[in-house]
Amino acid sequence: MSAPQTLVQAALNRLSARFGSGLADAAANLAVLAQDAPERFRREWELFREEVELEAERLENVDPSAPEADAVSAPASSADPQDQIDQIRAQVAHLARRLEEQP
């Protein structure tokens, strides 16, 4: 082979080697994801069920005549914006703690 042909062949060999290893890595990552998917789905489903149960309890315990009854789900526009922000931050912190507690 002449020098240009050798360079082209070498480039093709290296490209195929790199793509081959990239495909192998991608296949390995997919295998790991497929292996972890059922457990992750189970955890997410359990967390969703807990959230639904807590929301149902909250709705059962809400006094419809109370003006703050919908404050958690839909803050009133007349309420202080800083209070709304504080409530949202507290909810986010609570959810973050629950997610960290999950195994």
Image (cartoon, rainbow, N blue to C red):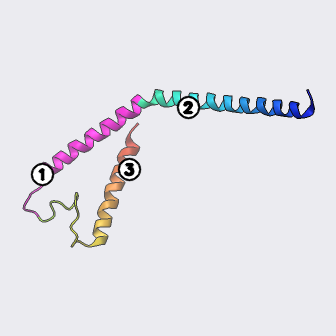
Residue pictured at 30% horizontal, 36% vertical: 46
Would you name the residue on which mark 3 appears?
96
Q: Does the magenta portion include 58?
A: yes
**Where's residue 32, x and y in %?**
52, 29
Q: Is the N terminus in the top left, top right, bottom left or bottom right quadrant?
A: top right
Determine whether the residue tagged by mark 2 lies in a helix, strand or loop.
Answer: helix
**Amino acid type at image mark 2:** Asn
Mark 1 is surrounded, within 10 Å at the Cα level, by few (under 14), some (14 to 19) or many (20 or more) other residues, namely few
Q: Main secondary structure of the magenta part?
A: helix
Looking at the rendered structure, the secondary structure element under dot 1 is helix
Q: Nearer the viewer, residue 26 or 88?
A: 26
Q: Earlier in the sequence, mark 3 or mark 2?
A: 2
First reached walking from the N terminus: tag 1 or tag 3: 1
Residue 28 in percent (x, y) is at 57, 28
Q: Are marks 1 and 3 in contact (CB under 8 Å)?
A: no
| Residue 61, numbered label | 1
- Describe residue 16's horizontal placement relative to residue 50 as left or right: right
- The span shown in magenta is 38-66
